[in-house]
Image (cartoon, grey):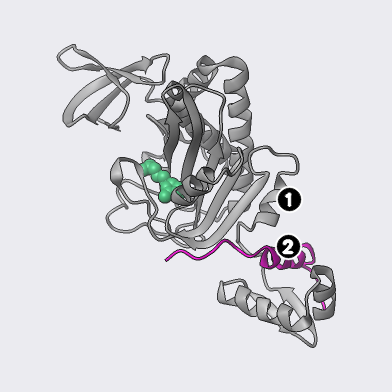
């Protein structure tokens, strides 16, 4: 089920409660600040409680957050990114089928470059190669970023690598955990995946209309479903503590903006350099390759100028991977 984006007023209420987190805020003060009646405030407090925000108090005494809510509400995200280009507009859903589908739709209706769509929960999160993305409520980051780069469609794979480099850098800055990037852009920690990126685009032959970078990060999951346990993990499971999703998301958006400008100013080679420095898969890694219906073992031998991965099969044949997946062979 998809429900509409988080109401602007609900977002203002969350912001106001967070700003005054240490005190009880009287109902009339909230009503006056937001410009609605006290009974509307009461109604919204009920709505927030239903959505899992712990709020003490009642209309006569006022309201106070019991603990800071772990919600990626637009006003909270925006407050972390005062002059950002990526994240200047944030659209938040408590529940949606897929933030990538929403971003593609919004993009088709002319949503501007830098718009970010976030959800607390996805009911049909999409992964690469037609897979599903496990999207447990409020435990992960599920975000899609609309970009409108003045670049040719052939640059799209570089944007995909860019997102992986940004996720690698943001995770390190926000958690101290050092990951590895598996081509094209899976972020791995201790050999398991914590972050995946699905890039989708709308383009003409010579012009990119829009690119949607869909990023899923397993942040505070305390266990993974049976079928994923061997191959996926979360930052909390690896770091042994919870992390602020808000802080990590803000780092991620800042890093995407930083690398995006690097791409525009210095060209693809700069991103390829960053990617190769961050990935042990860039060169000399023995991998199993599944691509174009083929399945073989090979050794990686660097990226080409377009971001494709060069590999050398065991029989000496060279291949250039533009799609597909690789896994490490020990
Ligand atoms: C992968 O298979 O590794 C890519 C996973 C991408 C998941 C993210 S979560 C936010 C965005 N919305 C989606 O439906 N998918 C991407």
Q: Is residue 15 magenta?
A: yes
Secondary structure at badge 1 equals: helix
Q: Answer yes or no: is residue 225 visible.
A: yes
Q: Label 1: which residue?
A: 79
Front-most of residues 129 and 234? 129
Report the number of discs: 2
Task: Answer left or right for 16 relative to 320.
Answer: right
In the figure, 250 relative to 183: above or below? Answer: below
Q: Residue 200 in the image: x percent, y percent? A: 42, 38
Q: Is residue 75 magenta?
A: no
Name the residue located 73 percent from the left edge and 78 percent from the top edge. Answer: 41
Q: Residue furthest bottom?
A: 60
Q: Residue 320 in the image: x percent, y percent? A: 29, 18
Q: Residue 310 in the image: x percent, y percent? A: 31, 17
Front-most of residues 322 and 67? 322
Q: CA distance from mark 2 to mark 1?
A: 9 Å
Please report contact status of discs 2 and 1: CB closer than 8 Å, yes or no. Answer: yes
State which quadrant residue 187 falls in.
top left
Nearer the N terminus, badge 2 or badge 1?
2
- Residue 15 tag number: 2
Quadrant in which the N terminus is drawn: bottom left
Name the residue located 23 percent from the left edge and 21 percent from the top edge. Answer: 298
Q: Answer yes or no: is residue 217 visible.
A: no
Name the residue located 64 percent from the left edge and 44 percent from the top edge. Answer: 87
Front-most of residues 309 and 227? 309
Secondary structure at badge 2 equals: helix
Within-10-Å neighbours for mark 1: few <14, some 14–19, many 20+: few
Quadrant in which the C terminus is drawn: top left
Q: Which residues are magenta?
A: 1-26
Task: Answer left or right for 228 relative to 44.
Answer: left
State which quadrant residue 303 falls in.
top left
Q: Residue 88 in the image: x percent, y percent? A: 68, 44
């Amino acid at each position: 089920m998809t429900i509409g984006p988080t109401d602007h007023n609900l977002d203002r209420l969350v912001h106001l409660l967070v700003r005054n987190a240490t005190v009880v805020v009287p109902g009339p003060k909230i009503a006056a600040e937001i410009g609605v009646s006290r009974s509307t405030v009461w109604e919204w407090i009920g709505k927030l409680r239903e959505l899992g925000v712990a709020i003490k108090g009642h209309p006569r005494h006022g309201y106070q957050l019991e603990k800071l809510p772990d919600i990626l509400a637009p006003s909270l995200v925006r407050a972390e990114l005062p002059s950002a280009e990526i994240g200047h507009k944030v659209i938040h859903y408590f529940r949606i089928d897929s933030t990538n589908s929403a971003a593609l739709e919004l993009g088709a209706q002319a949503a501007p470059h830098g718009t970010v769509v976030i959800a607390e929960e996805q009911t049909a999160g999409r992964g690469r190669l037609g897979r599903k993305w496990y999207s447990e409520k409020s435990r992960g980051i599920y975000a899609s970023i609309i970009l409108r780069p003045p670049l040719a469609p052939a640059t799209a794979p570089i944007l995909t690598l860019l997102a992986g480099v940004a996720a690698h850098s943001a995770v390190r800055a926000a958690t101290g955990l050092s990951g590895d990037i598996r081509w094209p852009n899976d972020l791995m920690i201790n050999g398991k995946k914590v972050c995946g990126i699905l890039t989708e685009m709308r383009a003409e032959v010579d012009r990119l209309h829009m690119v949607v970078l869909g990023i899923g990060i397993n942040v505070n999951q305390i266990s993974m479903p049976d079928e994923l346990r061997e191959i996926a993990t979360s930052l909390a499971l690896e770091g042994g503590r919870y992390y602020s999703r808000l802080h990590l998301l803000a780092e991620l958006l800042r890093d995407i903006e930083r690398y995006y400008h690097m791409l525009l100013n210095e060209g693809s080679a700069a991103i390829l350099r960053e990617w190769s420095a961050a990935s042990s898969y860039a060169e000399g890694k023995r991998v199993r390759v599944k691509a174009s219906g083929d399945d073989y073992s090979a050794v990686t031998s660097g990226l080409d100028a377009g971001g494709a991965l060069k590999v050398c099969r065991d029989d000496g044949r060279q291949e250039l991977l533009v799609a597909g997946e690789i896994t490490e062979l020990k």
